[in-house]
Image: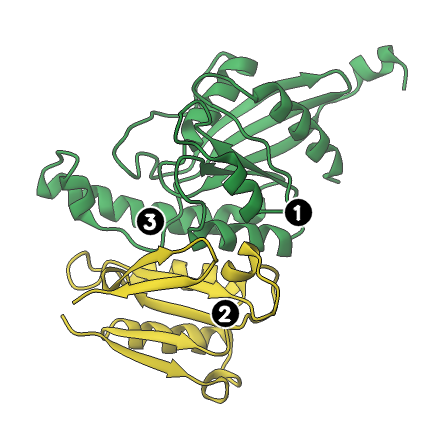
Chain colours: A yellow, B green
Amino acid sequence: MKYRVDFIPFNETYDLSSDEKIRYILSKVMRNTILVLESGLTHREELELIQRTMGEIDYQDFIGIKLFSFETGDDFKWSKLFGKGNKNKGFTIVAPNEAVSVIKDKRGILSIRITQ
Amino acid sequence: MSWRLWLKSKPKSINLGFYGEVNAGKTTLANKIGRDWADQEVGSVSEIPHETRTIQKLEKVNFTTSNTRLDLTLIDMPGIASSVNPTDFIKHGLSASEAMERAKEATRGIVEAIKYLENVDVALVIIDATKTPFDQVNFTILGNLEHQKKPFILVPNKIDLPESNVRLVRDAFENYTVIPVSALQGDGIETLYDKIAQMARKVK
């Protein structure tokens, strides 16, 4: 399986409602696209995305997503890497579940291996 | 309040929700609390993921500490995940049809658990201390609890196992209330009870 990585700039999603943003994300991820969203999701939107993902799972072609968020900033904290609070974070990455596996090193860099 | 008045006062009703990722030990902890305070268990435990696929409740749990009396409802939630793969269940020996049925029930359970979040008064967010705690689901649950201003306690579980790493959990979730336990062995459970009482006092 080949996956495409789309880097979605802020201006592509900033004026979408949460509902529209989640529909946009799911439509792309379900077509084997890994998304890097400059306009990150809030935790509320993340939960909504998980909930809506459950409704789309068909147990064969689509079994769900992997989701990562982190805030921007100079000083490293784990809570920043995975996002805290309800402001839009620096980035959110959403991928088809089987598309990526995660490697994290001790410096807190999020490393993702893309499945062949 | 005098001790006579305190004894006569009606215990506060609290919905205590057990949230967390799959196989973190939510039901094991709920059962431990149920046995300690009501001589009953909440649900069955299994190594196969998504054993709890519907919300399980144990009501009328009379919980008493030195200065707090509570009428607890223990609400054991299905584990929250962002994917459900029937193949994972087949690896644990289930047939293809059993695995598919379990997967369908698990997806329904995840939605149910998410929707129930607003009905919880105090949440225990249980993390498997033997794994790296960086599953985004943990941060998503905590972020939503904070947003809804729900009191919660982060509970790294399985601390009786040599591979557990409580320090890593504390580092990952600094500024949160972290009470490590072994739900199976009972380690740390009294400290958790004191903290539950403290959190329940915050509920209006």
| Upstream in sequence: badge 3 or badge 1 | 3
- Pointers 3 and 1 within a single chain: yes
What residue do we see at 53% from left, 73% from top?
A90
Tell me how far mark 3 sits from mark 1, CA to CA. Answer: 33 Å
Task: State yes or no: discs 2 and 3 in contact (Cβ < 8 Å).
Answer: no
**Label drawn at residue B108:** 3
Q: What percent of the width, then of the height, locates residue A82?
A: 50, 59
Q: Nearer the viewer, mark 3 or mark 1?
A: 1
**Image quadrant assignment for residue B46:** top left
Quadrant of the image containing the N terminus of chain B: top right
Q: What percent of the width, then of the height, locates residue A78?
A: 53, 55
Neighbourhood count class around disc 3 (C-alpha, 10 Å): few under 14, some 14–19, many 20 upward: some
- Chain letter for the residue marked with disc 2 in the picture: A
- Chain letter for the residue marked with disc 3 in the picture: B
Q: Nearer the viewer, mark 1 or mark 2?
A: 1
Q: Nearer the viewer, mark 2 or mark 3?
A: 2
**Label drawn at residue A41:** 2
Given the image, on which type of amino acid does mark 3 rest? Arg
Given the image, on which type of amino acid does mark 1 rest? Asn
Given the image, on which type of amino acid does mark 2 rest? Leu
Foreground pick, A69 / B143:
A69
